[in-house]
Amino acid sequence: MDKSILDDELWALIAPLLPPPKPRRAKYPGRLPLDDRAVLAGILFVLQSGIPWEMLPKELGCGSGMSCWRRLRAWQEAGVWDRLHALLLAQLRLADRIDWSRCIVDSASIRAVGAGPKTGPNPTDRARPGSKHHLITEAQGIPLAVILTGANRNDVTQLLPLVAAIPPIRGLPGRPLSKPRIIQADRGYDHDKYRRPLHAQGIRTLIARRNTLHGSGLGKTRWVVERTISWLHNFRRLRVRFERLAIIHEAFIKIACCLICWRQLKRP
């Protein structure tokens, strides 16, 4: 296995979060299960390169693509990536890398090869099947939560679910961070129906109004979420959705968010 795909420090954080292996039968135990670290390296290789599962090189020592696929689904169902994301956010807060002055939301559509849950006709791609990544970040672009929907879902419908999906950010004594102070967004999120519940929670909104001249000035601070979406789509497996099962694509998105958080944590 090429350890450059998964460094030792990150693996030390992930290993305790993985569920224990299933007990083996005393009689006819079968072949030994693949090493978790090797399988995770194969998953990361597919995420970063975008290759099909069946083309995963055997020379990497990660087992077959189907073995990696099964392990990825099991880990996603066990909530491994949610716990890893919360752990990394806590470490970022401890290192004073979380800027809680505002949170920014945005989305991006991608093409989906074939049908499946959380796909829909993409209005920007001649109604071809597509999905949409809805993202909320803190003021520096660190991803806080991401939601997968069909490409035909309006952006504003995911504003409240995104805010609710922010995990409690611990890392320091006292109350964890969970409720943003300010939400920023573009005109796609302009609807008083969704502003009012945020205002009731004490969250201010800075959302550009529809049918007004451009030049609100929000772009000077809102660009970071677009940069984070670009970071996500640098993982080639996220540029086009090949997975019919939404849970597999969601697992890839959450791993990518964890890797972005890890890179920010290790940044000088």
Image (cartoon, grey):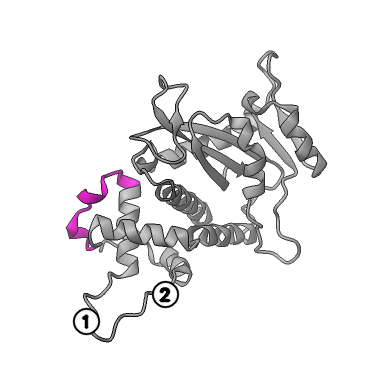
Q: Nearer the viewer, residue 46 or 151?
A: 151
Q: Is residue 187 above or below residue 73?
A: above
Q: Residue at the location (30% across, 65% down)?
A: 38
Q: Residue at the location (21% across, 75% down)?
A: 31
Residue 20 shows which numbered tag? 2
Please state if 162 lies on the left or on the right of 59 as rendered. Answer: right
Task: Count up the numbered dots.
Answer: 2
Amino acid on which disc 2 is placed: Pro
Quadrant hosting residue 43: bottom left
Please state if 237 lies on the left or on the right of 181 as rendered. Answer: left
Quadrant hosting residue 91: bottom right
Q: Nearer the viewer, residue 259 or 240?
A: 240
Q: Is residue 156 above or below residue 22?
A: above
Amino acid on which disc 1 is placed: Tyr
Q: Where does residue 205 sit, x and y in percent of width and height?
A: 74, 34
Q: Where does residue 56 sit, x and y in percent of width and height?
A: 23, 52
Q: Mark 1 — residue?
A: 28
The CA distance from mark 1 to mark 2 is 20 Å
Residue range corresponding to the magenta coloring: 48-61
Q: Is residue 218 above or below residue 181?
A: above
Q: Nearer the viewer, mark 1 or mark 2?
A: 1
Q: Where does residue 39 sit, x and y in percent of width and height?
A: 31, 63
Q: At numbered mark 1, what does the secondary structure look like: helix, strand or loop?
A: loop
Residue 140 makes an appearance in the image = no
